[in-house]
Amino acid sequence: MVDIVDPVTRLEGDDIPVSKFLENHLLGGVMVPGTTRFEKRNPNPSGRIPKWNMDNCTQCNQCVFICPHAAIRPFIVTKDEMQNAPFPVQFETLKATGAEFGGKRYAIRVSPLDCTGCNACVEACPEEPKALEMQSIDIDKKENEENWNYAFNLPERGDLIEKSTIRGSQFQTPLMEFSGACSGCGETPYFKLLTQLFGQRMVIANATGCSSIWGGSFPSNPYTVSKKTGRGPAWANSLFEDNAEYGLGMFVAMRHRRERLQNLVHDYVHIMELKDASEKTEKENELVHLLTDWLEACNEKSDKCTVLFDKMKPLFEELLDKETKPGARIPLLNQIWSDRDMFPKLSQWIVGGDGWAYDIGFGGLDHVEAFEANDVNVLVVDTEMYSNTGGQMSKATPRGSAVAFAQGGKTQRKKSIGEMFMTYEHVYVASVSLANQAQVLQAFIEADRHNGPSFVVAYAPCVQHGLRAHGLDDMVDESRFAVESGYWPLYRYNPALLQQGKNPFVLDSKKLRKDVQKFLKRETRFMKLQKNAPEIAEELFKQMNNDVNHRMELLNQKAAGYKSFEHEDDASVKVLFASETGTAARLARDFADACIHSHVADAMDDVELDDVEGTTTIFFIATCGQGAMPQNGKNFYKALCARKEPFKEGTKFAVMGLGDSSYFFFCEAAKLVEKRMVELGAEKILGMGAGDDSAEEGLEEGLHSWLDQVWPVLDVPPPEEVPHIVPVKVEYSPKAVMREAEEERVLHQYYQQDSIKAKSIPILSNVKMCDESYNRDFRTIRLNTGDDMTYELGDALEIFPCNDKDKVSEFLHAYSTDFDESTVVKIHDFGIDGEVSLGILFTYVLDLFGKPSKHFMQQLATFESDEEEKKTILDINFLKKAAKESGLTIADALLRFQKAHPPLPALLAMIPQIKPRAYSIASAPLASPSVTELLVLIDTWWCDEGEKVGLTCDMLRKMVAGDHLWCRMKMGSMDPPEPEQPVLCAGIGSGLAPHMAFLRDKVRAAEAGEKVGPFSLYFGNRKKAHEYLYQSELEEYEKKYDWFNLHAAFSRDDPNNKVYVQDLVGKTDDARLLLRDTSDGMMYVCGNRNLPKPLQEALVKSFSKWSEDPKEIESAREAMTQLYIKNRAQQEVW
């Protein structure tokens, strides 16, 4: 920076001696990465930056996605990091949503000296009222600068979340930041997103133009590297006319080098496998295992190869040190190491503007796309003119635009480059716009995954367009208007769908909602012609309108699908979706493909309300924000609410809602549509399905349960699923048996792998709280977690259960005579590399005695030769009946259908892994730092054969002091209170656990002389005599502390007067006094899913002082709702 960047910035570059370039390793066109973050140019003509209002924020990250300069970002921080900020008062945070961020905080920070004040983030915010508003940069300027710098240097935590969603992608650190692009630039958000998705394994060939000027004007370089790994995009700039050939040359060179690396690795592995075991060290064996895994995964388009290399690197370095000594054994290792930059699966991108792609460089681009073997990705940011050189006409310039070289208005229609490349049929093609962030994200991911060339053309509003009246401050609205008027269509052509027998063309914008001529009047490039030659303009604009309508008609025909309906109206089932992130759209399209009576899936806003009249409509509806309808369903729902006349007879529907049950507004948008359809007389053919993101199996659990009911109701056969089984590679070992120490080593390898990171913790006590004769079993389990496993208030402990060894032995002996629990095999799966006994695998890794899923039964059926038996296996009613009669397990199914008999490699692949079970912690870390206490209900259920116990509970009830548990800490889903905050807790059964932790922390604070706020605990269970958990401790606290109020309800003591927790909440003042009458009171709810709704009604009663006045009740209900919106009411339900 000092030797090169600073002098050039001062326009003194000519005075820099060559020696300085040598000293800084900058010869040969090399640029230092990430120099733009040091410039701090304050490039903000408006003098205004966005201010975050966290009370309105739903953490969707759409504002971050759109930012052209990466100057607004989300940060996931710990409580300590939040408190250690330079200005903690201004460092505002929310509890981070999502299980992956449990216990952490969410913050939005803006870099005052990098923000250009373009307003794009405010426009992109979907909330009403907005979570962002523009304010003067001078307000809290110093505090904002220092807090930004502090947050910028915190640990990167993007790896905690999947990056395939809008929200998840924006937690990935952008590796293109603070460029010199115009304020509100429509190009840079696309490049920024590419680096967030693929930046650490990405190579870029950039055509000369705007994107090369803001992308690499020496020494200003916005492309940077990850602080965590040191990796980032490799970027190079070509000439204007040959960028496609330049990028293809990069790809061919890398392909050649990678093939050479594969051959070298294969030779090394082969040589090592031929050696006797005594000749190989443990490190060499470990490296061979990793290299073998790499050979299997080397063509997989993901970060897997990079992860494998990170594990290999220290082994390489250690073994290469040995090779430098005389007598080094494997010179191949040095050759492999010299090509180490080829270990990651690189993603080659060729990027540039429309002048290059449509005009001067089209010949080379066409050559690249024409050959199926060219696995490269092309991104064209289309400004529809030569924007970098003053705005001259190109073949991308639309009819009627008055630009340089066409001041009298271009008379020819725009070149449809995407449709041209679709004719090759092997090219992935997408037309995208920032108006639909989910579609942009999906297109980029699909383009990278495609085996072959891809082409993505992206609409990019530009300063040369002359946006009226606020310039590029209206970049987001301009993008939306372009799409809604049909000026810029959104579509994706995916050749992979052809191989599945599906229509490869998906039109993501089907309906013209706005007049294209109104769009043209928003931009100076069109209005100049209107002003100078109104008659010509009128004629060209009319032709433009015809062009748009004709194109939309053709694109809709392409999207019509392959199903044999003479007309789409002949389809008796209509499938509609409202989707914010793309999940609901994907599920709806899959459903439409599978349903023989449906045409294609459409966004709700792409159809008229009359289109559902007299038909059967299946809705897939996501909920975004605080119960809001997704953008592409708002107009439909608005029309639905405005409709007065009822639907005619024959109008039927069903709704599948998608959401997260930890939110107050779970599936709210779906509920609203269902309610209004019923009010208008439509027949509900099935109750609403609910896909719950926070469920153990994710939203798929609720979805499949609902689908099993939908197909019979529609009189449609369910789609046939052909399960794909990837067998685990198994090699039998000559070793007869594994020693105990060897088995212990394998268990440590399994439980301590990166994806698990569990520890073996001793049990101090396991005490049953109820009488031995009582039919329910609550118990406290105390573990000596010591200093090795610290936890925070409100955290949970995840326990990894294991199967009963005797039952495992019994199963293996019954299943096969070829192997048993002592059999030793070699595998490289499940995080285990090397030898392991089948006893270990079936006891600790595989959920042998879990409930068989529909998918498992479909896999099992592929091995069954008896057609009658196969029908039984695939009969969903068999599963239900067997569960009721005997509590059918996977082991039972395998023995019941023993003719199927999957071989061991397939068996290991089919049986799911054992999942951990989370238990809320009842102890407080500051009061009990080295001991963790759990409150556990041993969960049982009944079938015809008798009582059954779950895997984890069965294990826990048998354990005694001194036994060890494999477990790990899990961040809690509830944000714990400060000691001085007013708190109301409501819990039933073992849901008392987190409330005990909060209460014990208050007691600790009180005993330490700290200020303590009021605490009201509402606890419910069945019978007081048997299930008054922690009774003596709670009653002692109530006597000792005047800030503690205890309310206990027992529902089974008096059959004629059942009292529940919600009854006590509704009859007392505590809720009103602690929650409505204070600004910082917190409510915590913990129990089963049936608790929150009646509890919310009880809050309304307490808040309204039991009034019958409708206005008072409505006011109380709004106050209750605001508790949830402002995150002052939190729940943990199951």
Image (cartoon, rainbow, N blue to C red):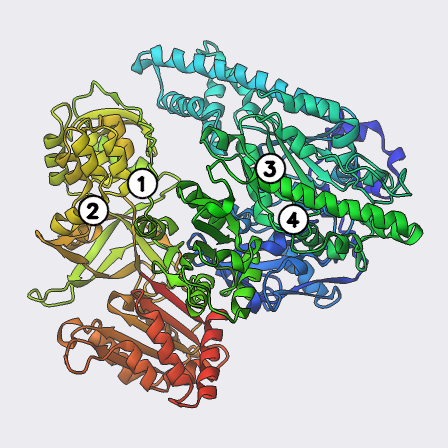
Q: Secondary structure at mark 2?
A: helix
In the picture, the quarter occupied by the N terminus is: top right
772 relative to 199, above or below? below
Amino acid type indicated by mark 2:
Asn
Alpha-carbon distance for marks 2 and 3?
48 Å
Q: Are marks 2 and 1 in contact (CB under 8 Å)?
A: no
Q: Secondary structure at mark 3?
A: helix
- Residue 794, quarter of the rendered image: bottom left
In the picture, the quarter occupied by the C terminus is: bottom left
Q: Is residue 595 left or right of residue 230?
A: left
What residue is pinned by disc 2? 877
- Residue 841, quarter of the rendered image: top left
User: Along the polypeptide, which appears first: circle 2 or circle 3?
Assistant: 3
Residue 434 numbered tag: 4
Mark 2 or mark 4, whichever is nearer to me: 2
Residue 445 numbered tag: none
Amino acid type indicated by mark 1:
Tyr
Residue 199 numbered tag: 3
Amino acid type indicated by mark 4:
Leu
Alpha-carbon distance for marks 3 and 1?
31 Å
Circle 3 packing at 10 Å, graded few (<14), some (14-19), many (20+), is many
